[in-house]
Image (spheres, rainbow, N blue to C red):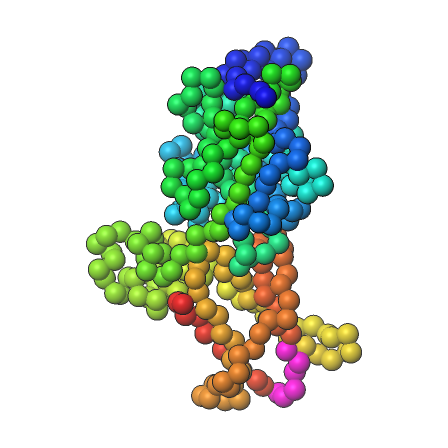
Amino acid sequence: MWHFILINAALTFCALGSLLVPFGVEVTWQSQTGGQDFRSDGLQRLDGSFQFEIGDFKALRDDFIPTSENVLEWQSNWRSFGVAQYDETLRRIRGRCFLQDNAVFSAEDSIFLWGYNVLSGVDAEWILMRNTEDSMDGIEWQWPGVGPLSFPVAIAVSQVASSEVIIGEVGGEDFQMRTARPFALDYDQWVQNAFSVSQQTMPLIVSPTADPDSDGQVNIIEFALGTNPLEPTQGVELFNISTGVSEEGDQVIELKIRRPQNADVRLDLRKSPDLTQFNEEQIFPEMVQTSADGEWLIVNIEVEKEAEFYRLFVSAN
Ligand SMILES: [Ca+2]
C-alpha cells in the first residue's frame, strides 16, 4: 500500500533538486510490477508495442483539455517529458524524465500519462490518465472526463523516494489499467470539429471536394491526413511516388500512401490503361512502413509499359 502524498513529496524533491541538482531534477515514474494491464478487449495483456509518455498538453496553449473526442488534436498539443516502453515481462512501465523544475507536479497543473501502441494503425489503442485536484490526500490520476471506458487509475509520488512517481489503482491493491480504441471520426463529425457552425451550412466550404484554404488538398484528403482544412498545409502528402529496382533487377515504381490514423476513410487504388476506364480490381498495399512522419502503405508496381495510369480514390466510409 502507499499513500497519496504528491504535494508534500513534490515540495521535498523540489528541495532535493535545488540542493543536489542545481539545474533540474530527475523523476522516475513507474507502475507496480505485475500489473493487471489489458488492451481494450479486457483479455489481451499489454505488450511491448505500447509506450507511455509523461507530459502535458501545453505545446500550443494553456487551456487545452483532452477528451476522447479530440484525440486528433492531442499530438499537436502534446509536450513530452519522457517516454517508456511497457515491459511485458515485468508487466509494468518505468521511465525517467529530467525536468528543469517540478512545477508540473503542483496542484494547479495537470500532467498526463499517455499510453498508446505504436505498431498498428487500425488497431491503435490508447490510455490517458491525468491528475485531479479533488482528493484531500493528494492528487489522484484518472481518465479524462469523457471516455469510452471508466477505469479509475491513480498516480502518486512514492514515500520512499520522493522523486519517484508511482501509478496505482484507486481503492485497490493491484494496479490495473485498460486501454481504449481510438476515436475514429466519420466525415460529418470531422466537419463539426473543423468548421464553425455557420461554415457548416455552406457546401462550398465543407463538401468533401471543397478546398477552402486553397492549398490544393480537398477536404476529404485533409480529413484523411488529419490536417486543418482552414490553414494551408505544406509538406504533408497523402502519397508519394519514387522509382527503384526490385531484387530481380527490374525497374519498379514505389507508391507510398499515408495510412489514415483517426479518420474513417476508404482508399481505393485502381489501375487504368487510358485514364478513362479503371480496373475493377483494387490494388492492395504489400506492406506497412513506419517512419518518423507516420505509417505508410507500400505498393510496388512493376513497369510493364511505357505509360500506366493509377488513380487513388478517397472516400468517406
Ligand atoms: Ca485544403
Asked whether the viewer can see residue 244, the reply is yes
Relative to 49, say whether 83 is above or below: above
Residue 267 point in image, percent of width and height: 48, 70
Asked whether the viewer can see residue 57, the reply is no
> Quarter holding the C terminus?
bottom left
Relative to 146, say whether 216 is above or below: below
Front one among 23 and 317: 317
Q: Bounds of the magenta span? A: 301-306
Front one among 266 and 150: 150
> Quarter holding the N terminus?
top right
Say which residue appears at 43% left-offset and 27% top-offset: 132
Residue 305 within the magenta-colored segment of the rendering: yes
Say which residue appears at 41% left-offset and 43% top-offset: 147
Front one among 152 and 24: 152
Q: Would you identify the image quadrant in which residue 65 lies? A: top left
Say which residue appears at 38% left-offset and 41% top-offset: 146
Residue 160 within the magenta-colored segment of the rendering: no
Relative to 269, say whether 27 is above or below: above
Front one among 295 and 252: 295
Task: Name the dominant secondary structure of the magenta segment.
Answer: loop
Residue 61 point in image, percent of width and height: 40, 35
Relative to 48, say whether 244 is above or below: below
